[in-house]
Structure formats: C-alpha cells, structure tokens
Image (tube, coloured by chain):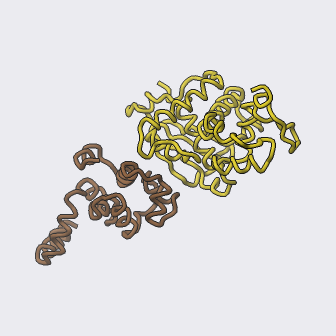
Chain colours: A brown, B yellow
Amino acid sequence: MKEADREATGLTFGKVIRQSRKDKGFSQRELAHRIDVDFTYLSKLENDRSEYPPKEEVIRSLAAHLDLDEEELIVLAGRMPQAYEEFLKQNYKTMPALLRRMRENPEFAQKVFEAASQGE
Amino acid sequence: MGIFKPYRFYTKAQIEYRANQLLRQMRRQGSQFVPQWPLDPTLVADFLDLGVVWDAIAADEEGAIAARILPLERCIEINEEILDMPPGFQESTLAHEIGHWLLHVDLEAAEDTSQKPHLPFVCRGNRELREGISPNLTQLQSIEWQAQYFASCLLMPRHVLEEMREGRNLTEWAELYAMREQLGVSISNLVNRLQDLEWIYIPKRSRQIYPGKALIYG
C-alpha cells in the first residue's frame, strides 16, 4: 500500500500489517510461523486486539518479512508512553526522522527533552 | 436499515453455486488466492477482506459462543477454546462463518460507515438448536444449516471429491480417512457430505458403509 493511502485512511498498526501480509501473499499462519509467534497472537495484532504493544523484536521481524519501515512500524505500534500515543500515531511518519536526529545529535536531543519537560 | 438480510430459503443447489462461485472468483484473482486442498479458509477470509481474530469470547446468559461476526468491522471472531477441538473443526467453523457472511449479512449495509454499532451475529454450534432456546427456532435452525452446508461445499467441492474418489472404494473407512487427510476436514463432515451427495449410505448407529444411490446408479 502506498504511504499516502495509509495516511489518508488513518490505518492502524493492525491494518498495516494485515494488508502488507496479504500483499506479500502470506497466510496468517504462514507469517506467524516465519516471525515465530502463535497465529492466534498475530490475529490479535492484525485486529488491534493485543492488550500491549508487541515486543520490539516482533515488530522488527514483521517489518523485515513485510518490507515495511521498522521505525515507522514501532511508532505505529504505540511502543511509546501512553500519554503521547495518539500524537505519535497521528505523526508516525515523521517520528523516525526525529528519533534518528536525536540519536545522531545529542545537543538537539537535549533541547527536545528540555522542551518536553517544560510542557509537562 | 438492518445489517442482516431478512430470512430467506436457499436450496442446496443455490448454496453450492454460491460456494463454487466464490472459489471461481478466487481462482480468477490468481496468486495466493488460487484454491488448493486442503483449503485454508483464512485465505477465503483474506480474499473477502474479512478480518479473522482468535480471541477469548466470554459466554453470555445463553451459554458458550463458538464464533461471531462483527459486520461493521468486517471481522470474524473465533473462540480460542475451539483450538482444542479435533482437526477440521477450526476450518469448518471459519467456513461456516464465511457462509453466514455471504448468505445472511447485507453486504451493502456492512459497507455503510454511517451504520450504528450493531450486535454481533453469534454462533453457538448446534447447542441452542438442540435445547430450543430461541423462540425463532425454525428460522435459526435453517440459517445455521445453510451456513454449514455452504461450509461443506466450500471445503469439499463436488469436482474435488470427484477427483479424489477415482480408484477409491468409498465403502472402506481407511479410504475415507485418507480423503479426510487430503481435505483437512473432520471425518463427520466428510461422511455427511458424501451421504448428502448419495455416494455412500451409513445407517444410523452403524459403522457399515454402503454404496449410495449415486454410486449404484450413477
């Protein structure tokens, strides 16, 4: 699915991985086997029914098998503080770039943390 | 506007046609949707863009729930408890729900995003039919039969069975169990289907298999 389509339809983590699985021609069980999770768990992820966001290694494995951007998928999965989840989901496309810049530029990261703490 | 179609009677031929039509559509779509046997009904759900989720479904005041359809979410929920059931049961349950989706859900209404949330369409297996809980027993019994007949036709199409019976003696249990393995269904589903096609006949409370009319006269 094209990125613009994802944004326009407000797709969730579950919808993105389900559509990508189908595009890749995997059955639910087949993909679950490849990423080494139970198919019932994958079915919950695909339907946004999981109680907690999946582990990062599961997300990275999903991204690798479905040719998705790992960082985008991590943000979309909501592996962030609950309070920022909605904001992050809405802006998940820009988050990886922000996080990368923070990692590469500690001074910039410090400014972001200061700004964030002032907002609390 | 209701999300479920008003009750209507379907003949066996109409239901079989609908199941075969779906398989033809999948074949035309190509790639991963080309049907192969044993048929994985989750691929059928994918083809129909139906979500499938295995989850805990709590019993309600009328008892255990095997599966249910959430029409506006285009989702079929299957109770995780049926994972413990014999091989073929999961496939049959999902194919049964797909039967409900195609035969009993108003697909146009399900597409209508302005629809208000609707109670899910609940399946309890055959329990309520035996116990007579529903005041609308005849219609409920009929739609459950329709969905189950659809499931049989989907998982065991006539043309696939025709190929599989070549060189087999269907009056031997070993042959039926071998067919069951190839089809990925339960032995009771296969026996019911073959009896329905009149290829075999097994008297009640008997293990003896007799050739059916279709084998004798066909």
Which quadrant of the view contains residue B114?
top left
Residue sitting nearer the eye, B107 or A65:
A65
Q: Residue B168 occupies which quadrant of the picture?
A: top right
Left or right: A67 in relation to B96:
left
Instruction: From the top left corner, tell me how far across and down residue B162 is, in percent.
Output: 65, 36
Q: Check the image and name the residue furthest to the front.
A: B167
**Where residue B202 sits in the image (x, y, percent)?**
83, 38
Give above or below for A41 relative to B188.
below
Question: Is residue A70 in sight in this rendering?
Answer: yes
Farthest-out residue, bottom: A106
Q: Is residue B73 visible?
A: no
In the rendered structure, the answer to whether residue B67 lies left or right of residue B52 reads right
Left or right: where B41 falls relative to A74: right
Q: Is residue A96 left or right of residue B167?
A: left
- Between B45 and A12, the residue placed more toward the observer is B45
**Residue under the image location 76 percent in, 28 percent down:** B214
Relative to A69, residue A115 above or below: below
Report the number of numbered marks: 0
Q: Tell me what residue is drawn at x 61 percent, y 34 percent.
A: B159
- For the C terminus of chain A, give its image quadrant: bottom left
- Location of residue A20 in the rendering, given as x and y in whole percent from the top left corner: 36, 52
| Residue at position x 44%, y 46% in the image | B32
